[in-house]
Amino acid sequence: MSQSKTQHKKRIAIIDDEPIACREIQRGLAKDLYVVETFGDGESALEKLASDPFDLVFCDLRLPGKDGLEIVREVKKRHPLTEVIVFTGYGSIDTAVEAIQAGAFHFLTKPVKINELRSLAARALEKVALIQEKETLKKSLAAYSRQQYIIGHSQAMQEVLSVVKKVSSLNCNVLIQGESGTGKELVARAIHFLGSRREHPFIAFSCGGFSEELIANELFGHEKGAFTGALNTKIGLLESADKGTIFLDEIEIMPASMQVKLLRFIQERTLIRVGGTKQIPLDVRIIAAGNKNLKKATEDKRFREDLFYRLNVVLIELPPLRDRRSDIPLLISHFIKKYNQQFGMSVSLTDPKVLEIFNQYPFPGNVRELENIIERAIALSDDKTITVEDLPEDLFAFSIEDMKEKTWLSLKDHEREYIRCVLNETGNNKVKAAEILQVSRTTLWRKIKQYDLDIPTT
Ligand SMILES: Nc1ncnc2c1ncn2[C@@H]1O[C@H](COP(=O)(O)OP(=O)(O)OP(=O)(O)O)[C@@H](O)[C@H]1O
Ligand SMILES: [Mg+2]
């Protein structure tokens, strides 16, 4: 994600009232494939900057209207991420020093030497790219901590969470196993963002559906000319994930030749791009995931045993949702909150018939399926509560065979989870909850104690 941000063509503005100087500098920068625009005065450049920010501004100190020093101050005030380099004549070094104190990146004396100009531009833009990347990571971290937490009160999920916390501070490889939609990627992200690599990239890649060549190309990158059509050097995902984490999904179907390459990468901590010879040292944590039993694949010789042991330093097994049904009410509340926020709605779920249907359903698509059902129900709901009509038909059409497999909740468990769900929905407001449940507040209080429901005292 941060990649695309830093790989856009850099935009440069040149502000100089001498058209010949502008043209010469523009020509000097043309080789480096920047987008360059020229301006005869500071005001018009500032106007353009407001709607379409530049990464770098070259600015003459002596200008009609606002002078260069004022422009530096305004650019840095309004667009702190934009770098400014000023041009100065021999007589105005003092002003150039002042410009640097006001936030300019550097100055160039006129007449400008093109090589000097290009190398200074490259250095300034490198700084811009680094800062932009850091900003993107900060934003993604903030977005992560705002909305991506793992929900689960069940014993099984509590155990998963405790392992996630432990391994996040270590640097070992982790293997996550679980059916589709059980939260493998969510857990991988949690491990990355809770650990010391959080300010470096998290990159997810799924091995499914790609040819051997394509996987090698994506993960390891290639050198210019490595094959017909390789016009430029391509940085692979492993290189982009340096100091961070790569999440390799559907690992069980990784082709044999790629398994060898990956094993070598783990053992030697260096990578050679396709068609290259140079060993590039890297520090990448690998979190692999699969929805099949990888151990079994090694026994059947479809997966290399040595690679399996390298990946499986810590194993996290995510149980299917049907084996941790007590998490369903919590997940329902979580997704209701999420999609109400997203759609700007305030739909709730209090209809016992709907809850009963959820309680019967085996959720073959696990948490993802539950999430989709809630998202759809909120989008379709035309009143304030989700009704049976807002649910997809599949929910009513599961087979008796599915029913046999599912674990039934006892009446007590059912009551406890229903109370928990209503309390969640009402923001733990016991007066409202008692009203919905049609019991006295004393009865509700007794039940909360009896079931040891963890409700904050208000
Ligand atoms: N315990 C959980 N708490 C909150 N949200 C969850 C939980 N588990 C899964 N989700 C949500 O369910 C959806 C599916 O999760 P995720 O993509 O991590 O599953 P997966 O196991 O990687 O699936 P697949 O095997 O199909 O790739 C995501 O939107 C995720 O945020
Ligand atoms: Mg996934």
Image (cartoon, rainbow, N blue to C red):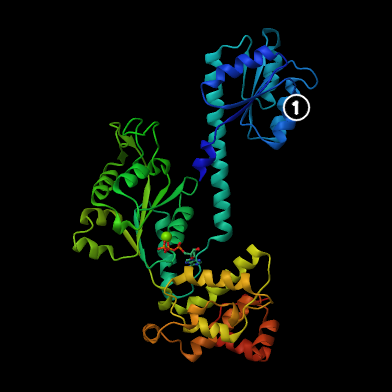
Residue located at (71% from left, 37% from top): 51
Quadrant of residue 403 within the rendered picture:
bottom left
Along the line of sight, which residue is nearer the eye, 163 or 44? Answer: 44
The residue lying furthest to the right in this view is: 65
Along the line of sight, which residue is nearer the eye, 329 or 101? Answer: 329
On the image, numbered disc 1 is attached to which residue? 44
Residue located at (53% from left, 37% from top): 6
Question: Which quarter of the image is occupied by the C terminus?
Answer: bottom right
Q: Residues within 10 Å of mark 1 (few under 14, many from 20)?
A: few
In the image, taking residue 272 as reference, residue 52 lies left or right, namely: right
Q: Is residue 451 visible?
A: no
Measured from the top left, where is residue 162 in percent x and y? 43, 65
Quadrant of residue 457 within the rendered picture:
bottom right
Measured from the top left, where is residue 72 in percent x and y? 71, 26
In the image, taking residue 445 as reference, residue 406 lies left or right, namely: left
In the image, taking residue 300 as reference, residue 386 lies left or right, namely: right
Q: In what element is the residue under mark 1?
A: helix
Residue located at (60% from left, 89% from top): 446
Disc 1 marks which amino acid?
Ser
Measured from the top left, where is residue 316 in percent x and y? 36, 64
Along the line of sight, which residue is nearer the eye, 309 or 368? Answer: 368
